[in-house]
Image (tube, rainbow, N blue to C red):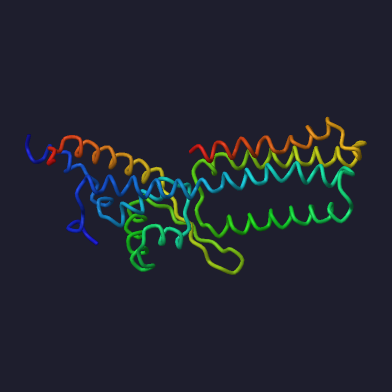
Amino acid sequence: MTADRHPRHRLDELIHTPVRLSIMAALAAAESIDFRRLRDLVEVSDSLLSKHLTVLEDAGYVDVQKGYEGKRPRTWLSLSERGRSAYDDYLRVLSSITRSAPRTD
Amino acid sequence: MDRHESFDPAAALERAEQVGANVRRRGRWHGWVWLTIGLASPVLLVVTATDVVEGPVRMGTAIGFMLLAGLLAVWETRRGLWGRQAARTDRATTAAYVVTMAVAALTGIVGEVADAPAWYMAWAALPAVPCFIAAWRILAE
C-alpha cells in the first residue's frame, strides 16, 4: 500500500484537531447549542472557541445564528448539511483507520 | 491550533463518542419536561374543573401549575442545548397538547363534571398522551 492510499490521508484536517473535533461531535449530537454551553462542553476559553468556530464557519461546516433573549445577546450554533456530511465522512475514515491498525496489546 | 496538534485516530474516535454521548444525555432532559407536563396537566384539569378539592386547594393547584410551567420554560431556555429528537418532536407535540388541553378544559367548563365522573377523568388524561409519547421518544434517543 502506498502512503497516498492510506486512509489517514482522507482525514479532514479541518476537523482532526482536539478542539474542532469536540465542537463538531457536540454539534452533531444536537440540533443547536448556545455558545456558552458549547464552551463549557468543550472546556475551552471564549476566545479559543471563537477562533475555531470561525474556521469551521468559513469552511461552511457550522451555521451561526445570533439573536437576543430579552436584552442579552445569544449565539446559537448548529452543523450545516455540509458540516454533518463532512463529520460523518470523518468518522467513517477514523473507523477504517482504527480497524486496520495493528493491535499493540 | 493547527494540524501538528492533531491526535491519533483511536483517541479522536473516543473523544467524538464521549462528547456526543455527553450532549445526547443533556439533550434528553427535554423528555423529563414533557413527562412532568404530562403528569401535571390531568391533575390540573381534574382539580380545577371538579369539586374533588376545596376552593383554596384548587387555586393553589392552578398557581402551582403556572409556576411549574414558567420554571420549566426558564430552565429550558437557560440550558442552551436543543436536542435533535426534541427538535423533531416538539412542534407536533406542542400542537397536540394545546388542542387536547383546550378541549379538555372547555369540557370541564361546559360539562357537568363537578362530581368527577369517570369519563371526565379519562378525558382529562388526554393531554398527557402527546406529552408521554414525546417524553418516551426523547428519553429513548
Left or right: A27, with B13 as reference point = right
x and y, in percent, of residue A58 in the image: 34, 56
Q: Position of residue B135 (x, y in %)?
A: 59, 40
- The residue furthest left is A2
Question: Which of these two is toward me, A2 or A17?
Answer: A17
The answer to which quarter of the image holds residue B126 is top right
User: Where in the figure is residue B118, as x and y percent of width and height?
Assistant: 83, 31
**Residue sitting at x 24%, y 39%:** A93
Above-or-below relation of A47 to A21? below
Q: Quadrant of residue A49?
A: bottom left
Viewport quadrant of the N terminus of chain A: top left
Of residue A44 and residue A13, the one placed in the foreground of this image is A44
> Residue most toward the top?
B119
Front-lying residue, B86 or A86 = B86
Image coords of residue B4 (percent x, y): 17, 58
- Looking at the rendering, in which quadrant would you find the C terminus of chain A? top left
In this rendering, would A57 be left or right of B104? left
In which quarter of the view is residue B74 placed? bottom right
Question: At 63% across and 37% down in the image, what residue appears?
Answer: B132
The residue under the point 20% across, 35% down is A99
Write the residue at 44% across / 51% down. Answer: A78
Q: Is residue B135 left or right of residue A85?
A: right
Number of marks in the rendered image: 0
